[in-house]
Image: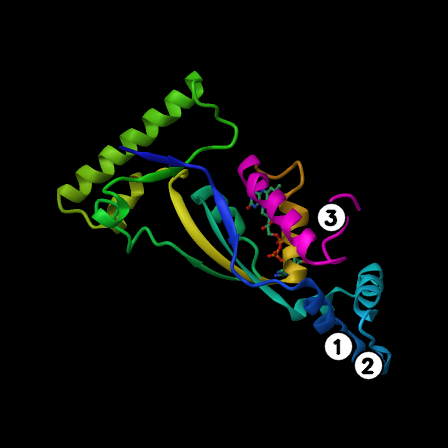
Amino acid sequence: MVKIIKPSFEILTPINGDEILKLIEIAGRTCYKSNDLITPDSAKNFVSKIAQRGHESVIEHYNITVRFICNRGFTHELVRHRLAAYSQESTRYCNYTKDKFGSEITVIKPYELNEGTTEFEIWKNAMENAEKSYMEMIANGSKPENARGVLPIDIKTEIVITTNLREWKHIFKLRTSPAAHPSMRELMIPLMKEFQNKIPVIFDNINQE
Ligand SMILES: Cc1cc2nc3c(=O)[nH]c(=O)nc-3n(C[C@H](O)[C@H](O)[C@H](O)COP(=O)(O)OP(=O)(O)OC[C@H]3O[C@@H](n4cnc5c(N)ncnc54)[C@H](O)[C@@H]3O)c2cc1C
């Protein structure tokens, strides 16, 4: 049986927005030798001014790590962002016939396919056929790294990405815009909102600029 799940994300870095702004202020004020102007409330205003001037290298001083549970189409697009570290579930080392995977493949429900429609049924059949072929290949002695060729783009995968705030901003700009893939927007829009809620100033006005 193919298992169908929704995609998700988890922010792995504990986030304290005020502390992040303070760190960026300490780093950024080095440029002006104005660290004497730091007060308990000065960071927000300083980072805001830095952002307005486009002095964005300063926000590279802080990294955030996020785990995505998503399909391989999503990760294929994500890893095009070069200024990040990635660790991804391997279809070479994971054997989905094993008990720990439930002896089944798990796939991600495409955002725009609705259960009960003909389109959804055709997609589900394709997922089941892919699983059948994968299981048969392994049963006939294939290694996972060869059987993986029959797995679909919608196969569930996990990826952990670590990158700095400047690159996150760039990723959100590109991946929440209406031009981005619906499955990309499905995760990136709520993730961006969480960043915006937790970290003042830095992620304001993305795609409204
Ligand atoms: C809507 C959409 C559709 C897309 N369609 C396709 C497609 O059909 N085919 C395809 O192949 N790709 C496609 N892409 C991927 C796209 O071309 C980029 O590879 C991807 O978005 C990564 O973005 P990036 O290169 O700006 O940034 P990153 O790799 O995230 O880098 C961040 C920034 O650093 C700078 N930078 C990084 N590396 C260099 C460098 N070597 N030289 C100079 N500056 C650098 C740039 O300013 C860059 O914007 C698409 C992307 C989007 C958002």
Of residues 98 and 85, the one nearer the viewer is 98
Instruction: Say which of marks 3 and 2 sits in front.
Output: 2
Identify the secondary structure beneath mark 3: loop
In the rendered image of this protein, does residue 170 appear above or below residue 186?
Answer: below
Residue in the image at 51% along x and 52% along y = 10
- State left or right for residue 48 relative to residue 60: right
In this figure, which residue is indicated by the disc labeled 2?
35
Q: Residue at x 86, y 78 (%)?
A: 37
Residue 84 figure quarter: bottom right
Observer-nearest residue: 114 or 38?
Answer: 38
Residue at the (66%, 47%) spot, across then down: 193
Q: Is residue 30 left or right of residue 19?
A: right
Q: Say which quadrant the N terminus sits in.
A: top left
Residue interval drawn in magenta: 182-209
Q: CA distance from mark 2 to mark 1?
A: 7 Å
| Residue 77 location (% of width, % of height) | 52, 47
Earlier sequence position, callout 3 versus callout 2: 2
> What residue did someone put label 1 on?
26
Q: CA distance from mark 3 to mark 2?
A: 29 Å
Are discs 2 and 1 less than 8 Å apart at CB? yes
Nearer the N terminus, badge 3 or badge 1?
1
